[in-house]
Image: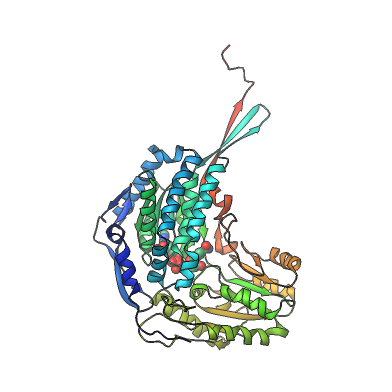
Amino acid sequence: MSTLASVSSFPFDTVSELSADVRSRFYIDGRWMAPDAAGSVDVVAPSSGQLFATAALASASDIDRAVDAARRAFDTGPWPNMSGAERAACMKRMSAALASRMGLLSRLWTAEVGAPVWFSNQFAPTAVAMLDYYAELASTFAFEERRKTRAGHARIVRHPVGVAALIAPWNAQLPILSYKLGAALAAGCTVVVKAPPETPFDALVVAECAHEAGLPPGVLNVITADAQGGAHLVGKREVDKVSFTGSTATGKLIAKTCADRLTRVTLELGGKSAAVVLDDAVLEPTLAALAPFTMPFSGQICFAQTRILVPRQRERAFVDAYSAIANGLTVGDPWDVTTQIGPVASRRQLERVLEYIETGRREGARVTAGGGRHDQRGEGFFVQPTVFAGVTPDMTIAREEIFGPVVSIIAYDDVEQAIAIANDTDFGLSGTVFTADAEVGYAVARRIKSGNVSVNGLEMAPNVPFGGFKQSGVGREGGPEGLCAFLEEQAIYLAVDAGLQAG
Ligand code: NAD
């Protein structure tokens, strides 16, 4: 494994690339506004543990201003009443502006939360693809439809739901925001984006793109706020829809607040996804296809395949081969192009992950790779890629979301037991099946109670819905399903034979 040669200066360089507005203001009502109070948040580079930026943190009154602007823009502004094609034209200008800043946005992902450059360079551009997809959908979607009825016909009108609060976590701020923002804007909603304090700048760069694209004032408002600010936003009566991605615990709190006024809500929450390796799967190609999705971005991705289920008679071979892969990963400075695994995002994450590793040991699982803090210079938040074998489904590490580079290998006796173990979880976000027979793979995938299951790999496409069964969420993002989450259907019956027409 590699060690850190020195503390990188790149986080500081990246901040100096940001405009003064992005560094210290919020985007409200089409303008850059100074925060009302002097709230601020320190941003720490996970690779060094050092402070590299300070960002503005919203007070309740900043949030109120953002919500008021969105409310005004929805009630009296042009955006909700434009045609889908008109909105699409503006969104396409926005996605072009986003594409032109892709280098900066990728670097921000690495600077703020330590995503290795190979990872941020590959996945940041998915935000452009998502905005483009929703722009395209806005221009073709049937916002009105006519159906024949007994007395005449009905028109089904799909209205934008109203003011939407968009809340995303720190781990993949830009792609997650693009799902929400693309669908909300395509629908004709106005939005308040609450950026998390760990990644305060990305959404503000998106606001710059919206401004450049000529999005009408108040349609997009961006503030950075902590949990308290998020709760304040969700509780506002002017908010008609909440679209939240984050932990299951926070999702439950938000659902309770939304229940009071029956505010529409979409929840994208945690996961504990299983990779089911069937007996006919050939070891090496299976591992080549599976391994990249077990600890992506140090395991801090909601769909990480953190439970690997293998046939008991092949357990030994599988544990040896996968542990060798984990041990061979290059851990180090996220700015180094050869680094495969960077730090975890924060000291809080570091402590949480190390505690889970200790719990795994205490409960009797066997460490076959890693197993602790990565030995390197400086104060970076590095965890060794860690593999546990001999894990049973009742162990804490097999049940709770760790959100770190920690994977459990669980042996099964037959395919029925494998499916039962895969489903023996409160979560249901993702899953994979590996097999030589694609038809068998499909049949097994259908029986896994997860919103997204892939056979012999893992894919997420903009036109396909993503979301969770059980405690992994409510509702879907992506595809037309994601657009419908920002629409409210109204049926208007038109009776042709009522005899009311003049003459
Ligand atoms: P978190 O729930 O702590 O925070 C998520 C966001 O909610 C942040 O912006 C935070 O400031 C805000 N927030 C916190 N408390 C709030 C409250 N009471 N009201 C309103 N907003 C509040 O989650 P996290 O630790 O930042 O993110 C990691 C979690 O996100 C993991 O569980 C991961 O699985 C999940 N996640 C899910 C998906 C998905 O698509 N299903 C994608 C990425 C991450």
In the displayed structure, does residue 492 sit left or right of residue 199?
right
> What x and y, as percent, mark residue 110?
41, 70
Image quarter where the C terminus lies is top right
Left/right of residue 246 with respect to residue 465 in the rendered view:
left
Picture quarter containing residue 282? bottom right
131 vs 89: above or below: below
Residue 87: percent from left, percent from top: 46, 43
Ligand 1, what quadrant? bottom left
Q: Determine whether, in the image, residue 20 is placed left or right of residue 455.
A: left
- Between 381 and 282, the one nearer to me in the picture: 282
* Residue that sits furthest to the left in the current view: 38
| Above-or-below relation of 368 to 398 | below
Q: Position of residue 130 (x, y in %)?
A: 51, 55
Please provide percent x and percent y for residue 210. Answer: 39, 50
* Residue plotted at (74% across, 65% down): 443
| Residue 188 visible at all | no
Q: Is residue 318 visible?
A: yes
- Of 118 and 308, which appears nearest the observer? 118
Counting the numbered discs, the total is: 0
Specify the color scheme: rainbow
Q: Quadrant of residue 348?
A: bottom left
Residue shown at the point (46%, 44%) measured from the top left:
89
Q: Residue at x 38, y 81 (%)?
A: 380
Q: Residue at x 47, y 82 (%)?
A: 331
